[in-house]
Amino acid sequence: MPSDDPNHILEFPGGYTRSVGPVIGRFLSELRDGRLVGVRTRDGRVLVPPTEYDPDTGEDVTDEFVPVGPVGTVTTWSWVARPRKNHPLDRPFAWALVRMDGADTALLHALDLGVFDEGAGPPKFLRTGMRVRPRWRVERSGAIGDIECFQPEVTMITAPTRLEYRLRSGRALDRFLEGVSQGKIIGHRCDVCGQVIVPMKGLCPKDGVPTTQEVELPDTGTVTTFAVNNLPDPRAPEVPFVSAYILLDGAGLTMLALVAGIPADQVRMGMRVKAKWRPREEWGKTMANIRWFEPLDEPDVPFDAIKDYL
Amino acid sequence: MGNACAVIGVGQTAYKTKRLDVSVAGLLREAARRALDDAGLSWKDIDAVVIGKAPDLFEGVMTPEAYLADALGAAGKPIMRVHTAGSVGGSTAVVAASLIQSGVHRRVLTVAWEKQSESNATWALTVNTPYSTSLVVGAGGYFAPHIRAYMRRSGAPPHIGTLVAVKDRRNALKNPYAHLKIPGITREMVESTPMLWEPIRYLETCPSSDGACAMVLASEDAARQAPNPPAWVHGTAMRSEPIFFAGRDTVDPQGGRDCAADVYRQAGISDPRREIDVAEVYVPFSWYEPMWLENLGFCGEGEGWKLTESGATALDGDIPWNASGGVLSSNPIGASGMIRFAEAALQVRGLAGEHQVDGARRALGHAYGGGAQFFAMWIVGSEKP
C-alpha cells in the first residue's frame, strides 16, 4: 500500500464561490432550517435534491417546493470498509442512495450504521429497502453537510437492569456455611420424617416443621443421576463437565455438585464419590470450598439402593 | 366447579425466532385481537383480563400487568398477573376460568406470551445468589439428570426420545403457527445432532420462540351468543410441590399425579387413555412424553415409553399427543402452557385445521414448570358438562 501522505498540495485560497440559484438555494436554505424539500416537475414528480430542470425532459421545473421525509428508503448502497480521511465518517459506513418519502428521486449521502472495526464487512441489516433518517448537525450553514449522515430508524432500545441487594444467608444456611468454612458438612434431622436435610433450611419442606437437630455428615456419597453438559459454563473447569446429584452418606436428599477427576463418559449412576476441597487457606463461608466431587475407589452402589432418591 | 365456563375465542401469533417488528404490547395485542375476532367481540365486551408470563428475569419486564393494562383494553377493569414459572400459561387460563366459574365475570380475556429473542432464559435460570450452589445450566441442564433417571428406572431403549422429537416436528408441519418446521425430519437426523446436556440431544430440545396466545372465556349465557362453537371447561386443577425435599420423586412428581387425579375427577374421567381423545401436554424435551404418559395415568409406571414406541401418541394413534407440534416445535415460554390449553380447546371446537383429530370431543391441556414442581391442567369438551 503506498503512503496516503501527499507530496504536493494544490488548494484554491478560501475555496471557490458558487451561486446556487433559486432552486438549489431554496433547498439549501431549507436544509439550514433543518428541513428537506424537493421541487415538483411539470409532470408532477418531486426531485430531491432539486434541480432547475427536469433531468428527463429538459423542461423547467415548477416553482412548487414540497416537504419530503422525514424518513427515506435506501435504494442502493456501497459499503466503505476503510474510510479515507476526507470521508464524512471515520469508521466503516455505507454510501447510500436515499429516496425520501414523498420524493421520486434519491439523494446520495453517508449512512452510519454504528461502530465497526476498520475493514469490517457490511452488517446483515444493511439492505436495500432499509428505512433511514437524517442526523442533523446542530450548527448548520446551508450545505448538504448540514445533514451529518443518515442513520437507521430506531428499532430497538436497551434497558439496563441492575438491582443491588444486601443478602443474608439466614440462620440455618449461615450455620451450614460456618460448618463448610471449617471443612464440615452439617445437616438437620427432621423430627417427623427422620430424614437428614442438607444443606439445611431450618425446616422440613415435606413435613412443614422447623428443624434444629444438627447432624454432621461425611464428605462422601453416591451419584444418583447426572447430566453431561456440553455447553460451557464459567463455574465448570472444562467442557464437557458433569453436574450430578450426590446423596451424601446419611443424607435424606441429594445435592447438586460438579463431578471431576474422571472422564465424563465414565461417570455412572451409583458411583461412589468424595468431596475435593480447595486448599484450606482458601476456605471461606461458601460452598465453593468444595471444588467438586471425585470418584472413590469403591464398588458402585446397586441401583435399588438409590432408586428412591431420584 | 361452579358455573359453566367455555372458551369462545382463541388467538395465536405465529411463533418465530424473532418478532422484531412488534413491541411486547404489540405482540400481545395481535393474539388478543385474533381471540376477540374468533369470539365476535371487541375490547369493550371484556370484563377482566388475566395475563401470564415467565419469571421477570427472563425478559426483565417487572410488573407487566401495570405496563400492559391499557394495551389490553383493561383501563377501568380488573387485570391480574399469574406467576407459576413454565406452567404459567396453563395456570393463567385456570385463574381466568375461575373468574367465570365463580360467577364474578361473564367474559374474561386471558393472554400469555414470551419474547425470547429479547429474553435470556438460560441466564435467568442459572444466575446465582451468593449462598446458593446452583450448577444448573439452563432448563436442559436441570432436566437431563431426571431424564437419565427415568431411562434407567423404566428400562426404556435410547431411541424413544428421538421418536417423540420426530413425531412432534411432523405434526408441526400441519400447524401454520408452529415455529420449527423441518420437512423430512427423520430419526437419523435427530440422532446426528449433538448432545447438549447428555442424554438430551439438540433436536430433542424445544426452540426459543417469540409469540403470544390468547383466549376469551365466557359464562354459559355469553357462550350461547358466540358465533363459533365453544369448548366447555370440564375441569381445572393446579398443584405444586417444593423443589427439594427428602423422598421427592422428581421423575414422577406427586404434584403432577395429584393434579391429574383432581382434574379427571371433576371431568368424570376414570381411564384417561380411553376417555380423552387428544392431549396437548407440555413436552419441552422429548423424553418428557413417556414420563408424563405415566405421571398422567395414561399407562402404568414404566410403560410410557412402550406407548410412545407403539405409535399410540401419533396423530393417527388412539391417543394423539401434541397434534399441534407441541412445545418441541414452538416455545414462547410464558405462552407455552396456554398454547396447550388453547390447542386442546381448538380440537374440541373442531377448529384445529390440518392437525385436527377427527371427532375429538374431549381434550386435555397440560402445563408444568419450575423443577417439574408446578402443574396446571384442564379438560375441555365439545359438550357442556
Image: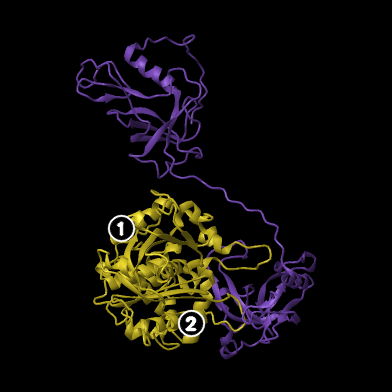
In the image, taking residue B352 as reference, residue A145 lies left or right, namely: right
Instruction: Pinpoint residue A274: horizontal percent, then vertical percent.
Output: 69, 79
> Element at badge 1?
loop
Q: Residue beneath label 2, please?
A: B258
Report if residue B96 is visible in the image: yes
Q: Colour of chain B?
A: yellow
- To which chain does the residue with label 1 belong? B
A12 vs B171: above or below? above
Residue A47 locus on image (x, y percent): 28, 24
Residue in the image at 55% along x and 58% along y: B57
Q: Which circle marks residue B41 in the picture?
A: 1
Q: Which chain is purple?
A: A
Q: Residue at x 37, y 85 (%)?
A: B269
Q: CA distance from mark 2 to mark 1?
A: 37 Å
**Which of the pair B340/A281 is nearer the observer?**
B340
Q: Is residue B4 above or below residue A24?
A: below
Which of the marked residues, 2 or 1, is nearer the chain's N terminus? Answer: 1
Q: Position of residue B110 (x, y in %)?
A: 40, 62
How would you rate the neighbour count of disc 2 (Cα within 10 Å): few for under 14, some for 14-19, many for 20 or more? Answer: some
The count of marks equals 2
Question: Could you tell me which secondary element the residue under label 2 belongs to?
Answer: helix
Residue B348 relative to residue B131: left or right: left
